[in-house]
């Protein structure tokens, strides 16, 4: 991929240019470590670092031009300087054009909401694969181009990485991209230049208030996906919004949505309604009622929350014209998603379930499901991340004590915070709802906490290990260590034998 610098400058009204403009740009980068020969280096000011401080490093690595918003001195000879008012806004304009607007050449399905995004994307991918399409996925666990896995850092990549990834998908003859669209990505406009065909709203509960500050801001960010779907004179036609009408935020989102809408739910009058639900340890049974009639389903995944995820996936694929029988077959063949209510079987006489639940709503969902299938005690191991929304800590403590018989509060990814302070804030919620006969402990070392839970477990108990799910690392104050809840639990069970 390459573009003439003059062409890119033409996208930036009022840009002031010093230096040669008859240059061929081979790549874009805002991280100096990613600069290669022929790169246009974009200097972004940040909270911790400022791209303007890395101009020399970018030059030595091959940058031929820089995009700045500050006055810079000591520019190396031969380096072209383009000054604009806002380099971040300029990047949002340049990146999609540089990669030739790849989303216009793909069918794009975006999934947003607090919980359920990952499972929903996996369900949709399975259905589309069953229908014979080649699918790319962008999300929390990994990015994939067909069967090829691509490393991921953020749920939604930054605008340059995203456009580059979409361009690669076009080159790989991908038909559909199913993408988790985080609130951060929407607020920071990482999806600039992306045109979605289907947008899915799963639900809205407390999360990321450390970033968004208020729930209202969080909701506004999520709503942007549906405003994008509704833009007039867009390149592609026939947009559809798939909305969980049982969620309190649904009416607000529907009000902002000006395209075709498919609603789904259990409790309300909707286009896709789940009825006769039967949640078991081995899976879930229910009927979906829609304009097509009744589709009975017998699934290998369980939990009421997964009923909603399935409804959203059905809505999205119906909107894309997938045959109802193909949808049914794909759903009934679907096994699981890594770290989402995932069973760990190391030959122990009790159940171990690992789940990514790291929000109050997510934790309550999995604990309610555990309660539905439990015949004995529920033992809960969970923590809350450091340097993140502190308001949810006592709420999650309260929920763990409400549904669990034994609660062990531990570290998640403490980051720069003192784990003991995080545990004290969780403990405030536990104490407030702890009933007679229930017990709790605080163990900051996560491995020790899991070990304690498994040694307390007896025949037919359920041990829930929540918060990290698919993650295979733990972020501490001064380092990141390898840590996988599933592997740790399995190893401890083997040691117990």
Image (tube, rainbow, N blue to C red):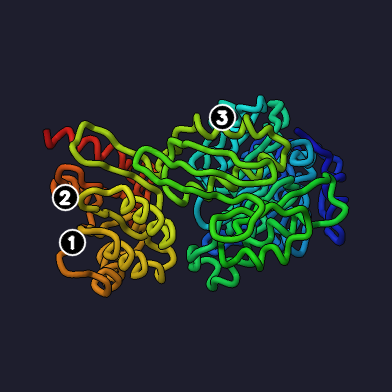
| Res 86 quadrant in image | bottom right
- Disc nearest the viewer among 3 and 2: 3
Q: Residue at x 61, y 27 (%)?
A: 130
Name the residue located 69 percent from the left edge and 29 percent from the top edge.
174
| Residue closer to the observer: 173 or 199 | 199
Tell me if residue 220 can be seen: yes
Please indicate, yes or no, whether residue 57 appears anywhere in the rendered image.
no
Element under label 3? Answer: helix
What distance separates the C-alpha of mark 3 from that of mark 2?
A: 41 Å
Question: Which circle's residue, 3 or 2, is located before the other in the chain?
Answer: 3
| Mark closer to the chain start, 1 or 2 | 1
Q: Is residue 106 above or below residue 31?
A: above
Q: Quadrant of the C terminus?
A: top left
Residue 467 in picture, x, y percent from top left: 36, 52
Q: Which residue is mark 1?
A: 441
Location of residue 322 with respect to 435 vertically, above or below: above
Question: From the viewer's perspective, is 129 left or right of 96?
Answer: left
Q: Indicate which disc residue 329 carries.
A: 3
On the image, the x and y values in percent for residue 210 come to 48, 67
Graded by Cα atoms within 10 Å as few (under 14), some (14 to 19) or many (20 or more), the crowding at tag 2 reads some
Distance from disc 3 to disc 1, alpha carbons, whole Å, reads: 45 Å
Residue to which mark 2 is pinned: 452
Mark 1 → mark 2, Cα distance in angstroms: 10 Å
Residue 289, position in %: x, y? Answer: 61, 46
Residue 27 left/right relative to 235: left
């Amino acid at each position: 991929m390459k573009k003439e610098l003059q062409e890119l400058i033409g996208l930036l009204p009022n840009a002031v240019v010093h230096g040669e403009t008859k240059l061929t740009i081979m790549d874009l980068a805002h991280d100096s470590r990613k600069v290669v020969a022929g790169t246009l280096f974009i200097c972004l000011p940040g909270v911790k670092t400022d791209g303007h401080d890395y101009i020399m490093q970018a030059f030595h690595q091959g940058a031929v031009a820089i995009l700045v918003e500050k006055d810079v001195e000591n520019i190396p000879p031969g380096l072209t300087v383009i000054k604009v008012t806002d380099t971040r806004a300029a990047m949002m304009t340049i990146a999609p054009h540089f990669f030739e607007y790849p989303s216009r050449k793909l069918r794009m399905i975006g999934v947003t909401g607090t919980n359920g995004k990952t499972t929903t994307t996996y369900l949709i991918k399975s259905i589309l694969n069953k229908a014979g399409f080649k699918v790319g996925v962008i999300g929390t666990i990994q990015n994939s181009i067909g069967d090829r896995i691509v490393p991921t850092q953020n749920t939604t990549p930054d605008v340059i990485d995203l456009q580059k990834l979409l361009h690669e998908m076009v080159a790989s003859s991908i038909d559909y991209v199913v993408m988790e669209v985080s609130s951060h990505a929407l607020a920071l406009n990482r999806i600039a230049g992306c045109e979605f065909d289907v947008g899915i709203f799963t639900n809205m509960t407390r999360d990321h208030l450390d970033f968004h500050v208020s729930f209202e801001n969080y909701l506004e960010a999520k709503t942007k996906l549906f405003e994008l779907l509704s833009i007039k004179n867009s390149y592609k036609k026939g947009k559809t919004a798939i909305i969980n009408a049982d969620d309190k935020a649904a009416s607000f989102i529907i009000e902002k949505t000006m395209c075709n809408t498919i609603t789904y739910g259990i409790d309300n009058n909707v286009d896709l309604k789940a009825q006769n639900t039967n949640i078991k340890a081995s899976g879930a049974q229910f009927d979906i009622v829609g304009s097509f009639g009744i589709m009975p389903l017998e699934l290998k995944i369980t939990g009421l929350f997964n009923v909603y995820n399935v409804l959203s996936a059905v809505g999205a694929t119906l909107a894309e014209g997938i045959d109802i029988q193909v949808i049914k077959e794909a759903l009934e063949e679907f096994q699981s998603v890594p770290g989402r209510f995932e069973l760990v079987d190391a030959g122990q006489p009790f159940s171990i379930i690992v789940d990514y639940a790291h929000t109050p709503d997510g934790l309550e969902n999995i604990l309610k499901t555990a309660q539905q299938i439990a015949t004995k005690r529920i033992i809960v191991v969970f923590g809350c991340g450091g340097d993140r929304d502190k308001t949810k800590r006592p709420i999650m403590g309260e929920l763990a004590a409400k549904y669990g018989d034994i609660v062990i509060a531990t570290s998640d990814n403490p980051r720069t915070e003192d784990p003991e302070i995080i545990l004290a804030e969780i403990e405030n919620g536990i104490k407030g709802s702890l009933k007679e006969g229930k017990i709790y402990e605080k163990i900051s070392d996560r491995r020790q906490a899991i070990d304690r839970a498994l040694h307390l477990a007896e025949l037919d108990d359920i041990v829930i290990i929540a918060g990290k799910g698919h993650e295979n690392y733990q972020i501490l104050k001064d380092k990141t260590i390898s840590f996988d809840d599933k592997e740790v639990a399995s190893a401890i069970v083997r040691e117990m034998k």
